[in-house]
Amino acid sequence: MLDSIFRYQDTTVRELHRGEELFAQGEPASAIYEVKRGSVRLLRQTIDGRTVVVYTAKAGEMLAEAALFAERYHCSAVAAVASTVRGYSKVAVLAALRRDPEKMESFLAGFARQIHALRFQLEMRNTRSAQARLLLYLELRADPTNKRIELEGPLQDIASEVGLTREALYRAVTALVAKGVLRRGRGLLQLR
């Protein structure tokens, strides 16, 4: 998305291994990022020392947009799988947006889509049933044409995104497969 708005000036490309950190919570915020390949998790340390997955950005999605208006990153970014990210200097992005109303509009449209997805995620997190919660998540992530979700890592990685334990996730998947609502294949899930 950012590629279509901004030229490659003031950008950097990073190849990340699974588990490699892109930036750490509290570091000076100097760039926003677009995931080109793979996925990157935004993680936040809570007061009691737990690590919470705030968001998982997939290929084509932005992350750390709040850095445009913050001095420090509010969370850490860690590659969920081997990933490629392009970093855009926040100074350059803000300057480009100020100069070009069309770029600003396109950029804001991306934020609107993210807000919609985050509201859907809140709805999902407020759903009590593990099966219903998983179905909402899969509806959000599934390819609209074939209702498939290609898994980039182990199935258990979805647990933190939907706010379930690993065991509860596997029970929900097993129950949905038994009901014929979900098909599970190697590296994929498909809604029926």
Image: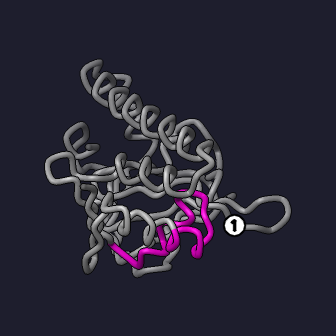
| Residue at 20% in and 46% down | 144
| Residue at 50% in and 56% down | 131
- Over which residues does the magenta segment extend? 152-171
Residue 187: percent from left, percent from top: 28, 76
Residue type indicated by callout 1: Thr
| Residue at 35% in and 77% down | 82
The answer to whether 90 is drawn above or below residue 151 in the figure is: above
Residue 152: percent from left, percent from top: 33, 72
Q: In this view, which residue lies farthest toward the right?
A: 48
Q: In this view, which residue lies farthest toward the front?
A: 179
Magenta run includes residue 163: yes
Magenta run includes residue 188: no
The answer to whether 173 is drawn above or below residue 2 in the figure is: below
Residue 153: percent from left, percent from top: 38, 76
Report which residue position mark 1 lands on.
51
Residue 25: percent from left, percent from top: 66, 60
Quadrant of image for the C terminus: bottom left
The answer to whether 26 is drawn above or below residue 145 in the figure is: below
**Going by the image, does 177 lie left or right of 144?**
right
The answer to whether 105 is drawn above or below residue 188 in the figure is: above
**Going by the image, does 179 lie left or right of 163?**
left
**Going by the image, does 105 lie left or right of 115?**
left
In depth, the one of 78 and 175 nearer the eye is 175
In depth, the one of 186 and 154 nearer the eye is 186
Q: In this view, which residue lies farthest toward the top?
A: 101
